[in-house]
Structures are given as structure tokens and as C-alpha cells.
């Protein structure tokens, strides 16, 4: 795992279409090109609570491929586990991915945030806030709802990951 000062690897996991690319684009600072598919990895220094942190964000674009999935499961220091609040299947997929992640990380307390994205699409909502929160409680991870389209809470999610990584670092 990362030493203080070296980049933290943050992996974006989730079903296709939930907003991983949009998250990665916002992180990369290219919010205008939300629909570009060519983004896979970006390293950047951000400031969280007055202290710099370097994050390498990896967009896992092919989690149906088992080999690729295993790589992502082993490579992250922390995970943003995304689903779309407008897509119940993606919520179930997030649960599956959480279970797979636990298999790869049995003993470690790897920071994970369950992210319910697309909360701007109020009328198309299929997963309630309380369902999301309950799922996160069962899986013992943090929870946040976001809208990449409105740039709502996306940075909060990245900052939350950094705070958890620091807590883990400081408790060693
Ligand atoms: P990925 O397959 O997980 O990388 O998903 P994308 O980032 O490519 O997003 C899939 C589609 O959903 C694209 O058309 C995005 O513009 C759209 N999208 C992503 N996030 C949001 C959001 O928060 N709200 C809305 N309304 N659309 C979003």
C-alpha cells in the first residue's frame, strides 16, 4: 500500500453506464468532454483538509471481463463503487462487486465508498436513498449520492476517499 507522499490508487468500479467515465473526467478536469470514452487513468494532486494528496484514478471500463476485473480488484488502495440511482440492475451489480472485492481483500480495511450517481434524474429514480444507505451499512462502507452531470458531490466522494486513506495510514 501507499507510503505517505506516493500516489493513492483509486479505482472506479461499477456497471456500464453508471458514470465512471464522467467521474474520471471531472477528476481530470475535463468536465466538458463528459462523453469521451478514451479515458482510463489520471494522476493528479489535490488538496484535502489543507493537506496535499496525490491520487491516481483508474476507470475500470470492463468489469464483465473476469481477468480485467481481478486486476482492478488487486490494484486499488481504495474504491469508489458506483451505481446509478436510475438503474436497479446497476445497484445489484454494485453489491456483487462489493462481495468480489471482499474476496480479494479479506483482511484489509480497504476504503470503499458506495456511490449512488445520477441523483439529478429525480423522475427516473429506481433506488431510494435509504436503500443505498442500508446497503452501505450492510457492506460496512461509506455512502454518498452524487450527480456527475450537475457536478454535485463528486469531489466530496474523492475527498472522502482521501480522508479514509489518511485515517488508515495514521492508525498504523
Ligand atoms: P460509464 O460507462 O460508467 O463510464 O458511464 P459514463 O460516464 O459513460 O456515463 C454514461 C451516461 O450517463 C453518459 O451519457 C453520461 O453523460 C451520463 N451520466 C453520467 N453521470 C450522470 C449524472 O450524474 N446525471 C445524468 N443525468 N447523466 C449522467
Image (tube, rainbow, N blue to C red):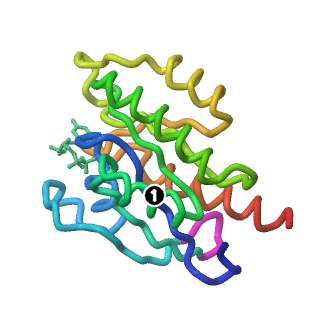
User: In terms of image quadrants, where is residue 19?
Assistant: top left
> Could you tell me which quadrant the N terminus lies in?
bottom right
Find residue 168 and report its horizontal and vertical position in percent: 76, 60
What residue is drawn where x is 54% and y is 63%?
74
Q: On the picture, is 80 further left or further right than 15?
A: right
Where does residue 110 sit, x and y in percent of width and height? 66, 54
Asked if residue 60 is among those painted magenta in the image, a careful observer would answer no
Is 66 left or right of 169, judged from the image as shown?
left
The quarter of the picture where residue 57 lies is: bottom left
Residue at 47 percent of width and 34 percent of height: 96
Which one is nearer the viewer's eye here, 162 or 94?
94
Where ligand 1 lies, by image quadrant? top left
Q: Is residue 34 left or right of residue 162?
A: left
Q: Percent position (x, y) of residue 131?
A: 50, 18
Residue identified by numbered label 1: 70
Horizontal and vertical percent position of residue 167? 76, 59
Which region of the structure is painted magenta? 47-52
* Magenta segment, prevailing SS (helix, strand or loop): strand
Instruction: Tell which residue pokes out farthest to the right in this image.
Output: 172
Q: Quadrant of the C terminus?
A: bottom right
Name the residue: 40% across, 28% down. 91
Amino acid at each position: 500500500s501507499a507510503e505517505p507522499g506516493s500516489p493513492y490508487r483509486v479505482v472506479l468500479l461499477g456497471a456500464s453506464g453508471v458514470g465512471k467515465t464522467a467521474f474520471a473526467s471531472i477528476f481530470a478536469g475535463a468536465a466538458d468532454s463528459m462523453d469521451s470514452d478514451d479515458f482510463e487513468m489520471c494522476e493528479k494532486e489535490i488538496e484535502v483538509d489543507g493537506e496535499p494528496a496525490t491520487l491516481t484514478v483508474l476507470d475500470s471500463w470492463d468489469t464483465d471481463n473476469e481477468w480485467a476485473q481481478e486486476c482492478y480488484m488487486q490494484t486499488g488502495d481504495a474504491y469508489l463503487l458506483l451505481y446509478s440511482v436510475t438503474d436497479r440492475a446497476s445497484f445489484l451489480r454494485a453489491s456483487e462487486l462489493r462481495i468480489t472485492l471482499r474476496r480479494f481483500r479479506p483482511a484489509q480495511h480497504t476504503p470503499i465508498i458506495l456511490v449512488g450517481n445520477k441523483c439529478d434524474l429525480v423522475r427516473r429514480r429506481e433506488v431510494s436513498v435509504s436503500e443505498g444507505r442500508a446497503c452501505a451499512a450492510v457492506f460496512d462502507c461509506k455512502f454518498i449520492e452524487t450527480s456527475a452531470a450537475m457536478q454535485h458531490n463528486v469531489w466530496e466522494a474523492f475527498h472522502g476517499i482521501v480522508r479514509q486513506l489518511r485515517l488508515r495510514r495514521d492508525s498504523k
